Image (spheres, grey):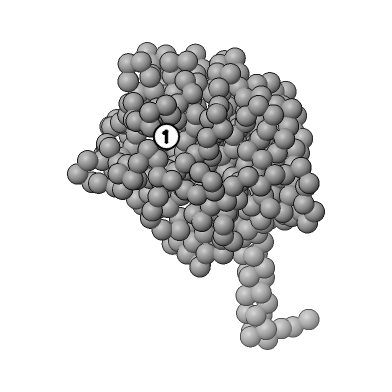
Amino acid sequence: MKHSLKALVTMIALASSAQALAHDTLPATLPTQQDSRLQQVATSPRVWNGITVSQDNRLFASLTQSEGAGLQLAEVVNNQLKAFPDESWNQWNANDPEHHFYHVNALRIGPDGDLWVMDSGNKGIGTGDQAVTGGAKLVHISLATGKVMNSYVFKSPTLQSTSYLDDVRFNGDFAYITDPGAVGLVVLNLKSGKSWRVLDNHPLSIDHQPIYADGKKLILRDGREKRVGLDQLEVSPDGKWLYYQAIPGPLARIETRYLNDNTLSAAEVAKHAEKVRETWSTGGTAIDADGNIYASDINTRSIKRIAPDGQVTTVVQDPRLVWIDAMWVSNGALWMPSGQINRTPATTGGKPSTVEYPVKLYRLPLPIKPSPLDHK
């Protein structure tokens, strides 16, 4: 059959559009039934990307700046956000960067029972923003007094120009910090204060594919794909392994003895990283005392459990679990902040926000306990 030039051009255009659409979407079977086990425990007028719960049930949250600047670290009291440790720390001061938050990205109760806060020192990943000297820091805050006990400030060469210090886990005298901005892992000796980099641009550190949430590919404000390398991490309960991954996977691991020895070359450390299994677009993770890793699947609004032998089971799937970010394990429960980050302009190519406020925090009763190494 012969076609006119106009018809042929139309056919090619339609085929190209279909191909582009297929590339920008991914099949996602979203749940319609709510799980009666889920308990809504708090809400927020600001998008949050992480929560942590103290032994005496105090609740703290890190607040992203994706919907505009404002409060970054808060204690949730009677469902209200209270600046923590105070208003001053939550107001950026370029003249005193080491004593003011620049861009809080993560927080957690540490093994000592105090609050530890990760200030990324940068506004974005892959956005062209640069790390701010003095802005990137791990801040230790006493819950008993509400005072800052210590602040580990990262500088060159640990901190690179594109660094975005993302999240932290503890293992004795060491803290491990992901850096998806410069794509690598930072190791911090908490006693000496020394830090060093490993796994920079390793094949198991970099992102290999786009990120999908609710079936749609994430897009930066300038139209480029949002790509995020080494992002999530967990330490096994015995302290032997560090598990880590880029947001879209795969899950990898490395023995911590190689990370903790700063006399080893970066090349020597890199040889010991190994792939565990393929995973999925993940908003956040947590680990329990039995070594099970809980990883959210932001494309199917579910939480999946990865057993130490690599077997995967679905823990919960619910339409309310929109982009579950950094989770928390307490005695008998998994805590899940729904951040709806995939509905913000930072991930939709600059389109107007479709976040449904308030964002919510859910609690799922489970027969689990927290890993004794990482936090109480």
Please state which of residues 220 and 110 is positioned toward the viewer in this rendering: 110
* Vertical side of 214 occupied by 327: above or below: above
Report the residue at 66% width, 40% height from top.
363
Name the element at disc 1.
strand
Quadrant of res 368: top right
* Vertical side of 222 occupied by 1: above or below: below
Q: Position of residue 301 (x, y in %)?
A: 69, 49
The disc labelled 1 sits on which kind of residue?
Val
Image quarter where the N terminus lies is bottom right
In this figure, which residue is indicated by the disc labeled 1? 117
Image quarter where the C terminus lies is top right
Q: Position of residue 116 (x, y in %)?
A: 43, 30
Q: Position of residue 99 (x, y in %)?
A: 27, 37
- Asked whether residue 169 appears in the rendered view, the answer is yes
Report the residue at 66% width, 56% height from top.
214
Report the residue at 76% width, 42% height from top.
37
* Vertical side of 223 occupied by 277: above or below: above
Please state which of residues 138 and 162 is positioned toward the viewer in this rendering: 138
Q: Residues within 10 Å of mark 1 (few under 14, many from 20)?
A: many
- Judged left or right of residue 233, residue 103 is left
* Vertical side of 2 occupied by 331: above or below: above
Considering every residue shown, the one lying at the far front of the view is 78
Considering every residue shown, the one lying at the far left of the view is 95
